[in-house]
């Protein structure tokens, strides 16, 4: 433990290198973000406010993201969750991957349940609004009236509402159309994501054996595609 209020409780080779971060048992785990927590497992890493519970080589770097069990799962989306399985990449805000399911960067609030299942960016309907149009919906919500969808307000000149979220269910299911539930996939559908990270400049290695700089956002997230269909 190297920062104020950071703590390591048992285990072997664990590090807590950010304020209020903590590691409880396990081995070679690294809590590198403020308020990060890792509970057991091996070779896990957690960023700002993220939590990893058990498993191996899991990497929760999205703001307040979480990973429970499994191996080699990654959560880059804020508030994203990965549950068990292997090699899932949960990139959408507040999205969920189960048993190795993955979601696209622009697929918030989606569910990919099943090993190698995927909800892509096109599995969500996106509508653009002006700031003035958005304010009308904001006022409706403030009055307690129902307003559907997830609002992306990062660019005031291009407010986006995302809704009609797709769901992928089962082994190698790919959901790439909004308001659908997908079972299986077609040729050329997205099979998953390859994440490329910027590299550390201090010469040190992470708990997973890489020199990826998890203190920065991924350099790029690329789609991987199937050659053949499966149903």
Image (cartoon, helix red, strand yellow):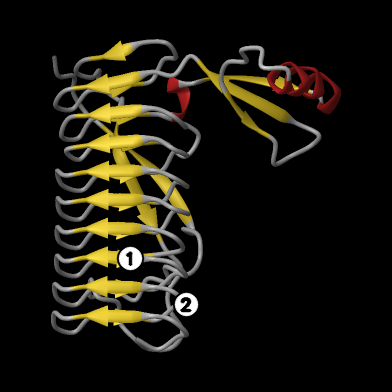
Q: To which quarter of the image does residue 104 belong?
A: top left
Q: Nearer the viewer, residue 196 or 50?
A: 50
Tag 2: Cα neighbours inside 10 Å, few (<14), some, or many (≥20)?
many
Please tell me which residue is depicted at 43% across the width and 81% down the height of the picture.
5
Instruction: Give the answer, above or below, for where 178 lies relative to 20.
Output: above
Residue 88 lies, in percent from the top left, at 25, 44
Instruction: Give the answer, above or below, for where 209 lies relative to 110.
Output: below
Q: To which quarter of the image does residue 100 belong?
A: top left
Assign a secondary structure to mark 2.
loop
Instruction: Give the answer, above or below, for where 147 lies relative to 17.
Output: above
Please tell me which residue is depicted at 20% across the width and 63% down the height of the picture.
57
- Report the residue marked by disc 1: 37
- Which of the two labelled residues, at mark 2 and mark 1, occupies the earlier sequence position? 2
Residue 74 lies, in percent from the top left, at 30, 52
Please tell me which residue is depicted at 38% across the width and 18% down the height of the picture.
166
**Residue 160, labelled with which disc?**
none
Residue 14 lies, in percent from the top left, at 23, 80
Residue 138 lies, in percent from the top left, at 74, 24
Q: How far apart, in angstroms, are the residues tagged by discs 2 and 1? A: 11 Å
Q: To which quarter of the image does residue 47 belong?
A: bottom left
Check if mark 2's residue and mark 1's residue have beta carbons within 8 Å: no
Tag 1: Cα neighbours inside 10 Å, few (<14), some, or many (≥20)?
many
In the picture, the quarter occupied by the N terminus is bottom left
194 sits left or right of 27 in the view: right
39 sits left or right of 51 in the view: left
Q: Nearer the viewer, residue 36 or 133?
A: 36
**Residue 19, labelled with which disc?**
2
Please tell me which residue is depicted at 33% across the width and 65% down the height of the picture.
37
């Amino acid at each position: 433990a190297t920062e104020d209020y950071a703590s390591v409780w048992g285990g072997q080779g664990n590090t807590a290198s950010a304020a209020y971060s903590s590691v409880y048992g396990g081995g070679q785990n690294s809590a590198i973000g403020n308020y990060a927590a890792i509970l057991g497992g091996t070779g896990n890493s957690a960023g700002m406010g993220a939590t990893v519970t058990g498993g191996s080589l899991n990497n929760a770097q999205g703001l307040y993201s979480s990973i429970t069990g499994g191996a080699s799962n990654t959560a880059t989306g804020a508030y994203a969750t990965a549950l068990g399985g292997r090699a899932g990449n949960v990139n959408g805000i507040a999205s969920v991957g189960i048993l190795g399911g993955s979601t696209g960067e622009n697929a918030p609030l989606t569910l990919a349940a099943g090993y190698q299942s995927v909800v892509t960016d096109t599995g969500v309907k996106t509508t653009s609004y002006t700031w003035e149009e958005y304010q009308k919906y904001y006022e409706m919500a403030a009055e307690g009236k129902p307003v559907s969808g997830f609002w992306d307000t990062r660019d005031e000149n291009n407010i986006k509402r995302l809704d009609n979220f797709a769901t992928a269910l089962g082994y190698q299911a790919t959901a790439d159309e909004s308001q659908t539930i997908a079972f299986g996939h077609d040729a050329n559908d997205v099979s998953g994501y390859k994440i490329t990270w910027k590299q550390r400049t201090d010469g040190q290695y992470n708990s997973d054996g890489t020199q990826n700089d998890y203190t920065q956002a991924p350099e790029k997230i690329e789609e991987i595609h199937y050659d053949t269909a499966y149903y």
